[in-house]
Image (tube, rainbow, N blue to C red):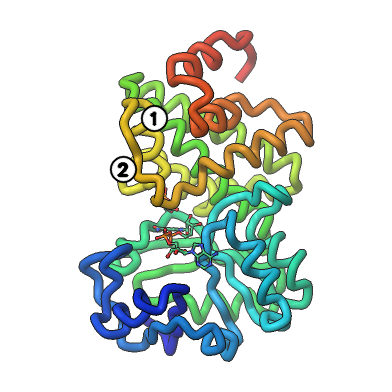
Amino acid sequence: ANGPVTLWARDPKASAAMQATRMNAARLDGYTLPESVTATSDLNAVFQADTILLAIPTQKLGAWLGEHAEKLRGKRLVACCKGIDQTTLRGPVALIEATVPDAIAAMLTGPSFAADIAGQLPTALTLACADEGEGPYLQGCLSTPTLRLYLSPDVIGAELGGALKNVIAIACGVCMGAGYGESARAAVITRGFAEMRRIGKALGADPETLTGLSGFGDLALTCTSDGSRNYRFGQSIGAAQDFDPTTTVEGAATAISVSNLAKKHDLDLPICTVVAALSDGSITPDTALATLLSRPLRKE
Ligand SMILES: NC(=O)C1=CN([C@@H]2O[C@H](COP(=O)(O)OP(=O)(O)OC[C@H]3O[C@@H](n4cnc5c(N)ncnc54)[C@H](O)[C@@H]3O)[C@@H](O)[C@H]2O)C=CC1
Ligand SMILES: O=C(CO)COP(=O)(O)O
């Protein structure tokens, strides 16, 4: 809404339809694009901008950045995706920093369903940027009267919160789909949050960041709402129902990355580990439950 904004999509038919109808019927039906938005499939139009928001799913981001690294040099690159890359075990900001080292990297994250933002419902997010000069600039130009951005210098904490809450949301969906109940879901949210803090500590995140919008805030939203695709994916596993494989479910891939991070850093992450196995169908919900409940009793 603060435009002008160029909205790029790979598929020329999809971008032409968006430009003509002012809607994205396939992904965000019922919402009109602001007049300031121009949809295109021409990437050169994107490279003319100084600030680029990247909403490509995390597992595809590294290759896209690598392909266009030269054109992205010196730009402000704001990652909007939430996940940990399976190949490199990096989050979106670390992927940007590794691939386009002279870009200004930032992360926009926190509790926000796309439809809520498009409907101009009140929303608060974290804008994480380690650059003290550019962070406030991005905070200002991406905030609107209904979209309130809080600034953080902690990009590691912000990218971990967004990535890990999706994994815990799958576990919560499984819990509800399998009929384990709301008390069990509350336990998963709480013990999942403990795992998030454990990973954050190992990777150098500020613990305060994980208690903010990008961590606890997004965990609260995604673990309790079937507006979340990760939660719904978990529900389908719990209820042994089919799930549309074309739906973007970042937490399934990220759970595997987290399991590998657990091995690398010698971390005990039981919920994330069972989510990785549940997501690829190698264990059932009842086996996951038995695994978690039979662990030795310990201090909280
Ligand atoms: N939808 C939501 O409410 C929110 C989504 N996000 C994050 O945004 C990211 C994207 O999610 P959505 O936009 O919701 O998913 P989506 O599935 O609606 O859209 C993803 C788009 O990326 C395109 N795409 C896939 N691979 C690509 C590639 N290699 N190059 C170019 N385009 C490619 C797909 O064709 C699709 O149009 C995810 O990381 C998600 O966690 C974050 C906050 C809210
Ligand atoms: O990140 C989101 C909300 O903050 C969207 O969650 P899903 O990707 O699970 O739909």
Residue visible at 63% across and 16% down?
A: 299
For marks 2 and 1 on the same chain, the one whose residue lies earlier in the sequence = 2
Please, what is the three-letter code of the amino acid marked with disc 1? Ile
Which sits in the foreground, 199 or 74?
Answer: 74
Mark 1, residues whose alpha carbon is within 10 Å: few (<14), some, or many (≥20)? Answer: many
Q: Residue 280 vs residue 132: left or right?
A: left
Residue visible at 40% across and 34% down?
A: 234
Secondary structure of the residue carrying tag 2 is loop
**Residue ranking furthest to the left:** 30
Q: Residue 46 vs residue 36: left or right?
A: right
Secondary structure of the residue carrying tag 1 is helix
* Distance from the alpha carbon under mark 2 to that under mark 1: 14 Å
Name the quadrant of the N terminus. bottom left
Mark 2, residues whose alpha carbon is within 10 Å: few (<14), some, or many (≥20)? Answer: some
Q: Residue 279 vs residue 135: left or right?
A: left
Residue 70: x %, y % from top left: 73, 81
Q: Which residue is mark 1?
A: 237
Q: Residue 89 vs residue 231: left or right?
A: right
- What mark, if any, has residue 166 been given in the picture? none
Residue visible at 29% across and 64% down?
A: 26
Which sits in the foreground, 189 or 99?
Answer: 99
Residue visible at 58% across and 59% down?
A: 60
- What mark, if any, has residue 226 been given in the picture? 2
Residue 164: x %, y % from top left: 56, 43
As drawn, 139 above or below 175: below
